[in-house]
Amino acid sequence: MNATSVNQSDCPEVQVPVSVFFTIGVMSLTENFLVVVAVIRNRNLHSPMYCFICSLATFNTIASLTKTWETLMIAIADVGHLKKTGSSETSLDDVMDSLLCMSFVGSFFSFLAIAVDRYITIFHALRYHNIMTMRRTGAILGVIWMTCGVLAVLMVKFFDFKVIMMCFVTVFIVSLVIICFLYAYMFMLARIHARKIAALPAGDSGRCRHHRRWGSNMRGALTLTILSGAFMVCCAPFFLHLSIMTVCPMNPYCECYRSLFQLHVVLLMSHALIDPAIYAFRSAELRHTFRKMLLCSDWKLCS
């Protein structure tokens, strides 16, 4: 993504080797593709939460594939086999930027959908399957993908307009606030609910059943909280960069921060590398599916 301008300060622009972008892109592409395949192949993972996780992994796969392809094109252009300013190259660059924007915005919306799903799972458990049907989940995913596609085209087409850039930053901030509020509210009510369970008679079978279900739901919420936290840490420097471009484009101190643009992009890409590792570490079902996919030649025999 082209979000830099001529550096007017004494701070030299930090250059990240092309090999770093390529390595992160290939590794994250492989990991997220495995997550998508695992969710599709394992029927035990055909639930709303894993559908949203699969959507997130698909957005990450698109981002990784696009960035890897862009890195290859830059490497080819650097050795003189490709023009950087040709009309077809410019159009292709716009397409890749649109895909990257769509992936990043889609990640926000996917995390937001996952947070809402966890909230319903925990606090409306008895009505969860009536509220979050697979048909409704599919409709939500359709809206997310359509919205992200339209927003991505608008962002790339009108990127030079400050209003568009600020809208991009605003989407991130609003999503961040909503996700933080939902998780903080969930864990606050979780403490109250845990006290109520502890107050039940020790020999009550309903207490044990409720405690197990509650513990399972809270473990899922904790996993997704870790995912959201990693995503926010990875994305925050990039969106601060966009904000600085709008608020103080010529300030020398702002320029020093903007000289770190390529490091911000590396950090932004890293969340696609981190997410699958968190899935595999926290989800026993996904670990089991990965093990079958990687170690078993016959899927049916390993099921």
Image (cartoon, rainbow, N blue to C red):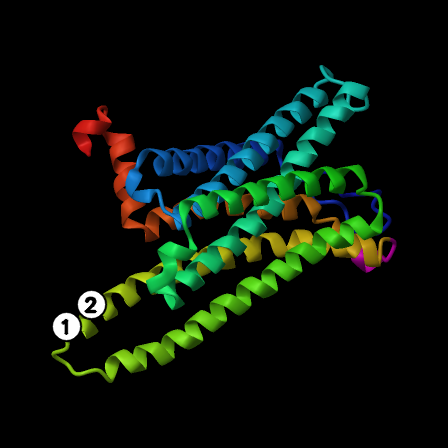
Q: Which quadrant holds the N terminus? A: top right
* Residue under numbered circle 2: 209
**Residue 301 percent coordinates (x, y):** 17, 28
Q: Label 2 is placed on what type of residue?
A: Arg
Q: What stretch of residues is rendered in magenta?
A: 250-255
Q: Label 1 is placed on what type of residue?
A: Ser
* Residue under numbered circle 1: 205
Which residue corresponds to the image point at 47% horizontal and 48% vertical from the top-left?
136
Which residue corresponds to the image point at 29% horizontal and 61% vertical from the top-left?
216
Which residue corresponds to the image point at 64% horizontal and 44% vertical from the top-left?
147
Is residue 99 a member of the stretch shown in magenta? Answer: no
**Residue 213 percent coordinates (x, y):** 26, 64
Which residue corresponds to the image point at 73% horizontal and 17% vertical from the top-left?
82
Instruction: Please name whichever residue, 237 or 41, is drawn nearer the observer in this view of the structure.
Output: 41
Height in image: 34 above or below 108? above
Q: Is residue 85 left or right of residue 43?
A: right
Q: Which quadrant holds the C terminus? A: top left
CB contact under 8 Å: marks 2 and 1: yes
**Residue 269 percent coordinates (x, y):** 57, 43
